[in-house]
Image (cartoon, rainbow, N blue to C red):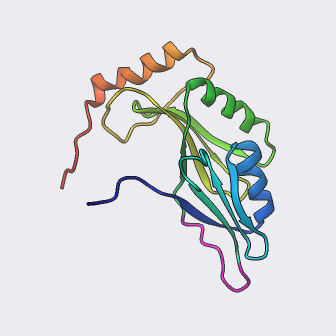
């Protein structure tokens, strides 16, 4: 018996409604439940599969928000989705795109949400390549170009190494 996957991530929000709008409207998550009096919103990429992968909670007076989330990562289904999300994010005035990269094992766009939490949207490639790796990509390249570039790192990086200590 053990952990099988990440269930959900919760973050504190200074402006809960702004964050609710961003993650539902821009990222496309479904609001599955919310309680405005308690100040919490639950969102899911697939509500039939998981009630929520993201919980947004309003900072309560005297509580203070933590800004120690390294990143929130959401899996997407295709390189077309990566392109569409990247262009959608470019059109959002309160969003700063950090980078678009291949990790060999995935192609990603990293950005900061309206409250400066780092977020990754990623498409998983079929390749198994040692990490860490982050090489810039132009998301408007063809699927074939992106996948060939991602796979090319197997020659220089090799496969995953597992535990090294």
Residue 138 at least partly seen: no
Q: Tell me residue 161's x, y (percent).
A: 22, 41
Name the residue nearer the viewer: 110 or 124. 124
Question: Hey, which residue is sitting farthest left in the picture?
Answer: 165
In magenta, the rendered stretch is 60-68
Q: Give above or below for 55 relative to 128.
A: below
> Could you tell me how many numbered marks the image carries?
0
Q: Tell me residue 117's x, y (percent).
A: 63, 57
**Image point (48%, 57%), residue name:** 7
Q: Is residue 20 left or right of residue 149?
A: right
Name the residue nearer the viewer: 128 or 158. 128
Q: Tell me residue 12's x, y (percent).
A: 65, 68
Question: Hey, which residue is sitting farthest front in the picture?
Answer: 48
Name the residue nearer the viewer: 122 or 1. 1
Q: Is residue 151 left or right of residue 113?
A: left
Residue 64 on the magenta span? yes
């Amino acid at each position: 018996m053990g952990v099988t996957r990440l269930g959900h991530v919760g973050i504190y929000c200074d402006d809960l409604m702004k964050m609710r709008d961003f993650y539902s409207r821009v990222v496309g998550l479904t609001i599955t439940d919310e309680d405005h009096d308690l100040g919490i919103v639950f969102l899911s990429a697939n509500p039939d599969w998981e009630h929520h992968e993201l919980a947004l909670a309003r900072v309560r007076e005297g509580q203070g928000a933590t800004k120690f989330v390294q990143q929130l990562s959401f899996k997407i289904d295709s390189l077309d989705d990566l392109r569409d999300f990247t262009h959608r994010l470019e059109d959002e005035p309160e969003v700063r795109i950090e980078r678009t990269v291949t990790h060999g094992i995935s192609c990603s766009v990293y950005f900061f949400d309206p409250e400066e939490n780092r977020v990754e949207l990623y498409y998983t490639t079929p390749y198994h390549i040692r990490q860490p790796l982050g090489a810039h990509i132009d998301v408007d390249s063809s699927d074939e170009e992106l996948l060939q570039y991602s796979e090319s790192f197997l020659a220089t990086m090799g496969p995953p190494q597992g535990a090294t200590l």
